[in-house]
Image: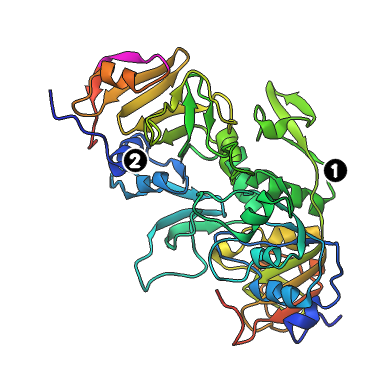
Amino acid sequence: MAEKVKLERQAMCDRLAMEFQDGWIVNLGVGMPTLCSNYEDSSREIINHAENGVVGYGPLAKAGEEDRHLVNAGGQKVTSLPGMACVHHADSFMMIRGGMIDVTVMGAYEVAENGDFANWRIPSRKGGGIGGAMDLAAGAKRVFIAMEHTTRDGGHKLLNKCTLPITAPGVVKMLVTDLGLFEITPEGFKLVEHAPGWSPEEIQEQTEAKLIIADDLKEFRFKA
Amino acid sequence: MKNKIFETMDAAVADIPDGVTILSPGFSGVGVPRNLLAALNRQGAKGLTGVSNNAGTVDENVDIGTLVEAGQMKKMICAFTASTHPSQVTAFTRMYNDDEIDAELVPQGTLAERLRCAAAGIGGFYTPTSVGTELAEGKEHREFNGRMHVLELPLPGDYGLIRAWKADTAGNLVFRLTQRNFNPLMAMAATVTIVEVEEEIVEAGELDPDLIHVAGIYVDRLVRIPEDGIWV
């Protein structure tokens, strides 16, 4: 057995980005999901969409080359690409609700085996941060989640049922954690790729929900 | 043609009374009407309701959070009533926790569409966003084509404070790149629309009519941002 390692955030996001198909319109959430844009594959064209109405933007701007009027949803200065377009916020969410976004990648506090997920409110804190998450969850063709497998104190995050207020019911299709890649099937979480050195039994121990182990379970892919 | 040009930010916001609803655009620090917000902060109107993507940030720039901190806002309607990270504690966070300010949390796309709806004279709309979540509780539900939706209502404003790139004396507006965000919607959803403009305000006829983002009929007041104004 290989040495037991937890996956780095960039490796997790690279793996989700490998699933993006040529021509997909992709909305990446603030934080970890933004790392998906670092994955390079010149064989396909990915069109980046952000909530503030920019579609077809390019990589992060280098120092000194920033345009003060051009940012992504996380407020990072990005570059323009030929074919880029800018629209206002209602038109941007028209794209989201209208089904133009092929995949959205978000972070989450919890994901449940029925595809529910929670990422906007912790009841111990007043208020919540929804941003565009509920619209994206309801409107995008696919919802992928990237998150750590457990909380900092080792608490479960892949659950039978969400304990926090959900963002949308039944929408998560794929999930990457630092322990592996999971598909959400009608029967629940299916482990399809495991982090190097981790057995399915060891991953199950870190998981509240009962895992289905793929017949063709593989080691986690770091490259396409 | 009616003169819409005001010489100063302070003159443009001088008559905003207590208790009105202010639409304040901007997203991720771009397209924020910082000069008009600074003037409204100096002017001192109180008991205001603010509509904005968020209720202020932890950075030093003037935004709606400046008015929150000054106690001018009684309520915020926004897509974030908690920061995305617990370490980011704003004036709003402290005041909301202490029940010193009221808030309504609205999904960002629903916020945008409610503004559009108000501008468009539409009585409401049904959206699948938030169905199955606690935000949908108490709202009218209706199924269309096998999918559940919730009813959302228009969100008009009394005053819209707008940041534009270019304008002409007729009030026609052009925005640049992601500066546009909520600006056109709020310009059209407000009863009185006040605009701070980055470039020189040109004579009517000098902007290409086919490239206008907001028609001048929506715009009441224009002020050029002075050289020593806030440019971020």
Task: Say what amino acid the circle numbered 1 marks.
Answer: Gly
Q: Nearer the viewer, mark 1 or mark 2?
A: 2
- The vertical placement of B79 against B4, above or below, is above
Segment tinted magenta in the rendering: A209-216
Disc 1 crowd, CA 10 A, few/some/many (<14, 14-19, 20+): few
Do pointers 1 and 2 mark residues of a single chain?
A: no
Quarter of the rendering containing residue B134 = top right
Disc 2 crowd, CA 10 A, few/some/many (<14, 14-19, 20+): many
The subunit letter for the residue under badge 1 reads B
Q: Tell me what residue is drawn at x 86 percent, y 66 percent.
A: B18
Give the labeled residue for mark 2.
Answer: A13
Residue A92 drawn in magenta: no
Q: Tell me what residue is drawn at x 60 percent, y 31 percent.
A: A165
Give the labeled residue for mark 1.
Answer: B123
- The residue nearer to you, when weighing B162 against B169, is B162
Q: Indicate the secondary structure of the residue bearing disc 1.
A: loop
Colour mode of the rendering: rainbow
Q: Position of residue A206 (x, y in %)?
A: 34, 23
Which image quadrant: the N terminus of chain A?
top left
In this rendering, position of residue B19 left or right of residue B40: right
Q: Position of residue B61 (x, y in %)?
A: 57, 71
Which image quadrant: the C terminus of chain A?
top left
Quarter of the rendering containing residue B15 = bottom right
Q: Is residue A36 visible?
A: yes
- The vertical placement of B121 against B142, above or below, is below
In this rendering, position of residue A161 left or right of residue A194: right
Residue A212 drawn in magenta: yes
